[in-house]
Amino acid sequence: MGNDANPATDDTAERLARMLRIPTVSADRERREHASEAHPFADFRALLRELYPLLHEHTEHEIIDPDGLVFRWRGTDASLAPVVCMAHYDVVPADDPEQWQHAPFDGTIADGFVWGRGALDDKGALCVLLDAVESLMSTGHTPPRDIVIALGGDEETSGVSGRAIAASFRERGEVPWLVLDEGGAVVDAPLPFLDTPAAMIGVAEKGIMTVRLRVRGSGGHASAPPAMSTIGRLARAIRRLERKPFPAKATTTLMVLLDTFRAQATGRGAAILGALGASAPLTARAFAKLGGEPAALVRTTVAPTMIEGGTATNVLAPEATATLNLRIAPGETVSEVMRGLRRRIRDREVALELIAGEAPTDESAIDSPQWRTISAAVEAAWPGLLAAPYVMMAATDSRHWHRFAPAVYRFAPLEMPGDLRSTIHAVDERVPVATLARGVEYWRALLISIPGAES
């Protein structure tokens, strides 16, 4: 899946390295009102003006609430619905820089990789998109319909700017022909029993919830503990949730994914895919037993992420709390999941508080002109590579567009084998230099092939 080094690839790598050297770490809006917190974002915008002069010359551009960037490249037919190409330029923190082989904000190019926080999530995808646009502009290309480049500045935290950009379209009644954000990538092993490389394209996202469990008691001295302490009751509630997960169900998208791979699989993989593809209930049970990512594809997941309680070693905690992160499977709602949590905990002394919740998105079609446009661009950059649909377990800014746009997809055109995907939000995040040229080629092919009215 690699690509031979060439000057264009080296130039893209250097541009990406410069982006990575600016620590655009997400922070809440209040903190970023202070100059000390805001300057990396302003510095990054200044760098984009330097690196992509044609983009700034040939587009209408603005900053949207508070760090979203929108560039509109006008097409030849203003009556046609636009294409929205998305990415984000904020990154998560790198709290353990001493563990990195190369410092997370040095933007080092070494050993065939560009190293740094955001190399994969999401400045690498942003860089190849802007490189492709700048390249096409240099040739005098004009698209048949408007191309809108929407760059979020706080996707990793609140997602305020991404939500505001989508809302601006919805408020004026402008429905894009296509919305394309980060998400899937070119992977080497899409499923545990399948090592067929594929371009995984997200057609939907699971919902997301944050729920707090709270147990209150009278406290007291630790020398005379009650039969059920606040912490013990809270622990029992969490254990009940882990012992009785939400039911597994194979989505239509998952069944199409299996069918897509079955057409090219051989040997043991073909036999497994054939058996699974014949029965959605069997698929759901099998994926649930595999655990991890496969299980997350077929059910709502519950993950305790924070726990708090107690103030001293010899004092019973008068209150204990736990925070749960849930990812809601398609077909379920926030209220249904809340009821499911209460049924599983079975304890009125455990209070449940919904902190935040968003339902799963709709699933975009895989038999549409938009899907075919994406698939053709994948073929142009990676000849012979399968394009396969899936439901994303993580959340992106593109979820805000599903409320009014019918064709929303997610694909970062970079090669991310398992060992690299594991560095996202972790130590030694890096992107292969060789894949950057293919990412640029993908975007060039897609932008050139966008249909006009005659199509």
Image (spheres, rainbow, N blue to C red):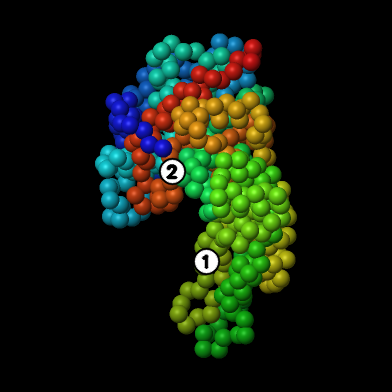
Residue closest to the eye, 375 or 447: 375
Q: Residue at x 55, y 36 (%)?
A: 387
Look at the numbered disc 1 and give the secondary structure of its residue.
Answer: strand
Q: Residue at x 43, y 26 (%)?
A: 441
Residue on which the image places disc 1: 307
The percent position of residue 299, horizontal first and vertical second, equals: 65, 55
Q: Which mark is residue 416?
A: 2
Q: Residues within 10 Å of mark 1 (few under 14, many from 20)?
A: some
Instruction: Answer with left or right where residue 445 lies relative to residue 204.
Output: left
The percent position of residue 325, horizontal first and vertical second, equals: 57, 57
Q: Residue at x 28, y 55 (%)?
A: 98
Position above or below: 448 against 255: above
The percent position of residue 281, horizontal first and vertical second, equals: 71, 55
Q: Residues within 10 Å of mark 2 (few under 14, many from 20)?
A: many
Position above or below: 93 against 449: below
Q: Quadrant of the C terminus?
A: top right
Whether residue 165 is visible: no
Image quarter of residue 44: top left
Look at the numbered disc 2 and give the secondary structure of its residue.
Answer: loop
Residue furthest out toward the front: 267
Are the residues at dot 2 and dot 1 in contact (C-beta closer than 8 Å)?
A: no
Residue closest to the eye, 276 or 320: 276
| Amino acid type at image mark 2 | Met
Instruction: Answer with left or right where residue 124 lies relative to residue 185.
Output: left
Instruction: Answer with left or right where residue 338 lies relative to residue 444.
Output: right
Q: Residue at x 47, y 40 (%)?
A: 186
| Amino acid type at image mark 1 | Ile
Pointer 2 or 1: first along the chain? 1
Residue furthest out toward the bottom: 224
Image quarter of residue 40: top left
The percent position of residue 430, horizontal first and vertical second, equals: 36, 44
